[in-house]
Amino acid sequence: MKLRAKIFLFIFITSFIIFTIVIGVIVFRYRNDSLQKARGLADSFTVQGANSVKSTLEKDLGVTKTIALFFKGFDKINEKERHNIYSDAIGNVLKGHPEYMAVWMSWELRFIDKNYTKPYGRQRTVAVKDAGNIKLIIDTVETEGDAIGSMYYQQKMSKTDLLTNPYFYVYSPKEGGDSILETSIAAPILKDGDFAGLAGIDITLDRFQKLTDGIRPFENSYAILIANNSTVISYPEGKFAGDSINKIFPEFVKFNVNEKIREGKQFSFIYVDSVNYSNYVSFYPVKVGNTGSPWSLCLIAPTKKIEEEAIANFNYSLFVGFIGLLGFSLIILLIAQRLTLPLKQSIDILKDLDKGIIDFSKQVKARSNDELAEMARTLNKLMFTLNETAGFARKIGQGDLTATYKPLSDKDVLGNALIDMQQNLRKATEMEEIRSLERKKQEWAQEGITRLGEILRKSTGNLEEYLLSILSNIVSYLKAEQGAIFLLNDDHPEKVFLELRTAYAYNKKKVLEAKVEIGESLVGRCFQERETIYLKDLPEGYTFISSGLGEHEPKSLILLPLMFESAPFGVIEIASLHELADFEIEFLKSISERVASSISVALKNQKTEDLLEKYRQQTEEIEERERILQEHLKELQEAQKEIEINKIENRSVIDALTKIGSVVWYDMDGNILDIKDPHLSEAGLSEKTMIGKNQREFAPEAKENPEEYEKFWDGLRSGMIQKRVFKTLTSKGLLWISEIYTPIKDHTGKPYKVINIGIDISGQKALEEQIKKLQEEIEALRKELKK
């Protein structure tokens, strides 16, 4: 039977195709609807969890708003009582909420100090838990101007609620306290629409761990709480807290997760993990008050688990369809048996080809000229062609990328694809070699950073040893030959220079003396220009490297400026007998800032120790001067008992006292009888003009606190010795004076005048300020290094 007589068979084939399409459309549409419902259910659990977190945070925000409203009435409370009331208030809030780490408030000084009119400057009051007790900290900051860009400044400008991104904080760092992940919630204190301050709380974020652990609506599902900057707040088993969500799930980058969290959007997607396991990921925002920094709750559930019911229904529908297709196939099978023998043989060959089998013993024997015979001949030729193609593919699979193959034609899809694969494999091999080299460079750099980090953390009390350990580590790791560290010497501001602090060569410390002027030589240029200098052609005679084989000129030299807070303070110089590779230079640049920060901390520590020693010496000198003063006063009092009042002012004792400090005689009403003060001229006064004046005229406390001033003089009139410390502004700057007031008694024991002796302690106060400032800078540097 001719093939055209068999065309009617296509009717059955067409029916088969239509039947398959109809069943497929119905079944897959039902499956998609079921999947959408299942995912909607997962989204609903995400919304419930997010609302639970929101409820918790809004309760905390409510506390801060309550504090802010309470503090709003500050002008209705007496100024003397206000501080105690508000300090007790924040302390009681902290006691009543064990989950809080600190409760605080900041006041603009112009609202609480009637004499302060500047639009900046604030007073901070903080109640914090310290070893189980509540510690109160009060200080005044930003009196020189607002800290532009700070969290407080932003709230001052926006006057909105605050919910900060998570941060790590160490309570009691001197006792080795643990680093705690926490956040701050605050509300503005507004007075007639003007920003008067900020009230807030610091809370630990481990409180959300139990909440998110309870969100497991499906088997193997879990929830993650994420901050506005994509920092993980809680994760199953408490892992990854403080890490970025993209660090845990790098694949989330392609879904723009960070941007959507920051904008507070609700979204979801399908995520396939590293083991090729599909998961449904649902995000819902946690918007708290009008903070404008929403967090987000993420629910991750295996797609298979949330779609179990939908998949079961799909499988049932598929089974029913399969039964129908099976019946239809039986009918087609009966028709196929009536086909000609060549067609049957061709089908056998095609089945073998479908399994990858090429058996030449099954070639079709075609004895006619009809369409089936032509198909048989073509099929036989295809077997030979596929066999040659398989041989070519086998050689490529064995790694022979030089094997040759000629495609049947320009349209030979398989042959041309194999040739393309051969070329791509060649390129891939070359690219893999390049990537392998890059990985080794990165691993080398990372190991170097790790080793250096260990050295930087092992800071000792000896600065020279610390610098040598840093330098030797860098030189040895680069396999260079020698190096040096130059640091800025600004002991004399009128003449600063770069001083060689340590040098290293062949694991031996070189004891050298070197000074480099700013801008001179390569070291001075590197410092002045603040740029890295790398030379492969060194100036003749610049330096030599000594070894067991003699002296050699280095092949390369690199100088890196040591920068801290955009200001240079030193230079690292390294010389090598080999040229440095680009990745080695990049490594040096990448560690220079970290090395500079660590050395800066070490320098400040050394300066602090020097200042503390100087402070101790000055304190001992002042104590010795006070001891001598007490001895002279004792002599004066003993003399008073033995002779008449007018004869006891022994001139030698008075002269000794005026050498120590100032001496002023007052009558019992505070009028100056006589004065010996070397600092009067600095204030634009003279001893003559001061005699007869009452102390009330120039004593600030007489106006600021008249009650205490009267108690002070009442004590003197009753015969009590009084002490005080005060400061005054002179032409030479701020002057601090420590004074002792001693009543002089007549023969009846009644005080009739007062002698006041003052000692200049400005140097001691200046040292205290320098030490405090250095300690604050060191603490700030340590926090920056921890980041």
Image (cartoon, rainbow, N blue to C red):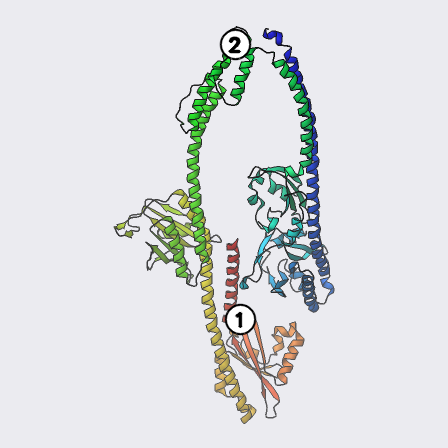
As drawn, which residue projects farthest toward the left?
550
Up-down relation of residue 602 to residue 42 (above or below):
below
Res 182 → quadrant = bottom right
**Residue type at numbered disc 1:** Leu
For label 2, the crowd category at 10 Å Cα-Cα, with few meaning under 14, some 14 to 19 and many 20 or more, is few
Of residue 400 and residue 494, the one placed in the foreground of this image is 400
**Residue type at numbered disc 2:** Glu
On the question of residue 379 being in view, the answer is yes
On the question of residue 235 being in view, the answer is no
Give the left or right position of residue 652, taking residue 200 as reference. left
Residue at which label 1 appears? 735
For label 1, the crowd category at 10 Å Cα-Cα, with few meaning under 14, some 14 to 19 and many 20 or more, is some
Residue at image coords 37%, 48%: 478
Residue at which label 2 appears? 374
Could you tell me how far apart the alpha carbons at marks 1 and 2 are, in whole angstroms? 116 Å
Up-down relation of residue 784 to residue 299 (above or below):
below
